[in-house]
Amino acid sequence: MSDVTQRFGQATAHFGELVHQVKDDQWTNATPCSDWDVRALINHLVYEARWAPPLLAGQTLEQVGDKFEGDLLGSSPQSSYDDAIGEVTAAAGAPGAMDGTVQLSYGETPASDYLAQMTCDFVVHAWDLARGIGADDTLDPDLVQFVDDTARPQAAMLAASACSTHRSTWPTTPIRRRSCSRSSAAGVRSSGSRRVAAHMDVL
């Protein structure tokens, strides 16, 4: 298992723990991403996860099309999340998967970089979700460090595409950029209060 697939597993597992903590009356709770309530935020991450297997398998953006638009959670959001993560985990762990490239909106990208960017999104949005449902928002320091290490080399690009004073989106969306309108990263912290400088949305 590569380091990036291991980190992806840790990030999606933590986000999944929070998904399973959502109570019936919390799906419409607000989150730090002012455009998304709890359900919409989780749908966004499931959307990202659903895109990954076909892209990792070599499909083009046109081949995937609008297959994953709309509500992806259905009547059982937790099960939908688990199923999506199971599929992307299997796809990312397939022999040679991390050695190839994927087609994103700005061109061919190493699959390992794509998975790293997805990992960052799951880490940052875990803080958003925790805040939305009133759960513990402390993040694993190793995962926060991974986000920082991944973002730092892209600092110039992130700054150039900034949507606000405090946040940027990483332009990797197959079809379009999707981002929350307020900074999540400004509040993301580990137990050591390390702050992440940039918030990246893969999709």
Image (spheres, grey):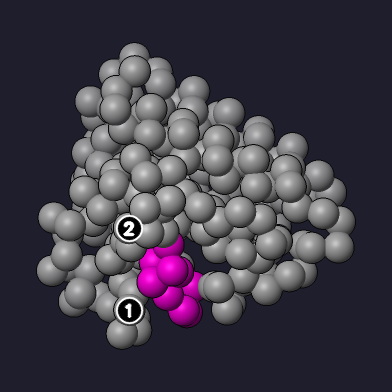
Foreground residue, 52 or 32? 32
Tell me what residue is drawn at x 49 percent, y 23 percent. Answer: 90
Residue 32 falls in which quadrant of the image? Answer: bottom right
Tell me where residue 189 appears, x and y as whole percent. 41, 59
Horizontal side of residue 56 vs 146, given as left or right: right
Count numbered badges in the picture. 2
Tell me what residue is drawn at x 42 percent, y 62 percent. Answer: 188
Determine if residue 181 is in view. yes
User: Quick check: is 182 in the magenta stretch?
Assistant: yes
Foreground residue, 30 or 195? 195
Tell me what residue is drawn at x 70 percent, y 61 percent. Answer: 133
Tell me where residue 37 appears, x and y as whole percent. 67, 70
Tell me what residue is drawn at x 37 percent, y 45 percent. Answer: 141
Tell me where residue 131 appears, x and y as whole percent. 61, 64
Badge 2 marks a residue whose secondary structure is loop
Q: Amino acid at mark 2?
A: Arg
Q: State whether residue 1 is above or below residue 38.
A: above
Badge 1 marks a residue whose secondary structure is loop
**Residue beneath disc 2:** 194
Q: Which mark is residue 166?
A: 1
Foreground residue, 155 or 85? 155
Q: Quadrant of the N terminus?
A: top left
Question: Mark 1: few, some, or many residues within 10 Å (few <14, many ≥20)?
Answer: some
Q: CA distance from mark 2 to mark 1?
A: 16 Å
Q: State whether residue 160 is above or below residue 170.
A: below
Residues drawn in magenta: 180-188
Q: Quadrant of the C terminus?
A: bottom left
User: Quick check: is 98 in the magenta stretch?
Assistant: no
